[in-house]
Amino acid sequence: MKFAPCIVIPIYNHKDAIGTTVAHLAVHGLPIFVVDDGSDEPTQQVLAALALQYAQQMTLLRLPENGGKGAAVMAGLRAARATGYTHALQIDADGQHDASDVPRFLDAARAEPGAVILGRPVYDDSVPKARLYGRYLTHVWVWIETLSLTIRDSMCGFRLYPLALACELIDRVRLPTRMDFDIEILVRLYWRRVAFRSIPTRVTYAADGVSHFDVLWDNVRISRSHTRLVFGMLWRLPMLLAHKLMPRRGARADTADESADEPRPEAWWRIAERGSHLGMSLLALSCKLLGRRFTALWLHPVVAYFLLTGRAARVASDDYFTRLSAVAPSADTPRPGWLSAYRHMLAFAQSGFDKLAAWSGRVNDTDVTFDDPSAFEALIASGKGALVIGAHLGNLEMVRALAVRGDHAKVTAVVYTEHARRFNQVLASSNRDFARHLLEVGDFGPETAVLMQQRIDAGELLVIVGDRVPVREAGRTTDAQFLGASAPFAQGPYVLAHALGCPVYLFFCLKERDGYRMYFEPFAERIELPRRERAQHLAAWAQRYALRLEHYCRKAPYQWFNFFDFWASPKRGANGRT
């Protein structure tokens, strides 16, 4: 298939911004269709001058009267298609979008010619707060109408359409012609199994910018459109659920029905954080006002939604339970399937909810007990610092909250917070001490050890996880047997322990019937890594950790929260296959 892209710019009375917008786009050498949606005389004069200036590159289309943004975009798409172009990059005329991102959109479209490439706005401080928060309501409705989070932002005016698919829809379905067009065309394309990819792009709002958004009537139109789309979703419900099991039109085989932010299995840190800041904040508010028991009821429909829309997480959960069943074939071991995946995700949601409750002061010391406190008490009595290795198992965060609130110990969590920024912001808003004992890192090495040595010398406990590889440490892994197969484990915890020269403990906190139970056990008085035998020693320590992790996974199978292919590596690929 040939790739012949162009640019479509709808414009209505943006005479002051259009010249700069066209100039910034012209440098990319693409044909430009400017669609004048019945602008006033001054704007027409500016457009006529631009048509002469860019005569070899710009085509000016005039609509006899103002029909709305949707009408202008559809006219531009049809004209581009009739002229022989295969793809059209739609961009607003007001200069809010970063034209330097055009090559990124084109590269994504070349990779997947049948996908719609959407801009996902990255706002600076210039964005009006009312507009920013107002968009979230539309986002939620679109996620409901598509039963998916694939369309991250349905209102961004910076997007690239495959013209064959877009014009086929435009010609067969009566689409709205105003501001609601941008939303409805995406939802209906999704219903037709078109693939979507998202690209983060900077959006700025000029102080003297002109907006043609009619707060009253455009919101009425958008509400009417959402009503129509929700009813359309309901009678398409069986089909939409069936589409979850089918590849989307134009999608790469390895990314069917996923957004552009969905990673290959080995890149866990690229998996986009699911759930909006608004939704998390509402749960936090409900917990504060209505209590834990009532708010916990909301977790069930939320988890059901994520179960239906999170195919990658479902597959990873099934893989985990398949492996666990093979090494622990007992009646208590969950069998892979929809019910187990639901209980797995529900346990994860409850864990996050309990973290929020702990930082909000709604969990008491009596809710958390030690299985055997002797090792922990001896360490605290010694006044020594230590490295504590945990896992994404149970609820490590809740214990840190209790320790900070009760001054039982100085605890600092060493985390990769980039992957869960929104959730951590909600936790931070519930307790001012949250961020004070939080240290974000990208890797483990000499520089990291220097930052942490002072904390160890001050008698702090540094808590890290051993079942994730930091973002910039993808290559520094060592294989260990875990649940019957070889899996890549990070070398970082053991390199860090060697550099710090401090005692090392393992720590797990599992939810049981009577609350949370903590397991704190000695791992090494000191980790040595002789230069000549470094690889062997790293492998031995990783294997020892993997065996303890497997022990606790068997003990609490629903509480290991790694919803990606843990056994994949850059060398082996998904599911450990070469």
Image (spheres, rainbow, N blue to C red):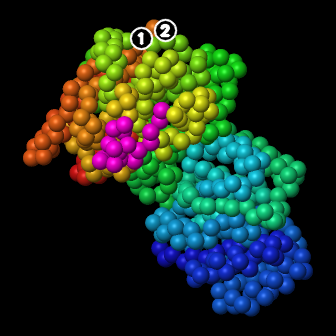
Vertical placement of 62 versus 378: above or below? below
Magenta region, residue range: 437-454
**Residue 426: x percent and y percent?**
60, 34
Taking the image as shown, residue 152 lies to the left or right of residue 248, namely right
Whether residue 403 is visible: yes
**Residue 26: x percent and y percent?**
63, 81
CA–CA distance in space, label 1 to label 2: 7 Å
Tell me the kind of residue under disc 1: Thr
Tell me the kind of residue under disc 2: Thr
Vertical placement of 94 versus 342: above or below? below
**Residue 136: x percent and y percent?**
69, 44
Callout 1 crowding tier (Cα within 10 Å): few <14, some 14–19, many ≥20: some
The residue located at (49%, 8%) in the rendering is 366
Pick the residue in front: 248 or 448: 448
The residue located at (44%, 49%) in the rendering is 270
The residue located at (81%, 72%) in the rendering is 14
Q: Which residue position holds label 1?
A: 369
Q: Secondary structure at mark 1?
A: strand
**Residue 50: x percent and y percent?**
75, 86
Indicate which disc residue 366 carries: 2
> Is the C-beta separation of discs 1 and 2 under 8 Å?
yes
Pick the residue in front: 252 or 216: 216
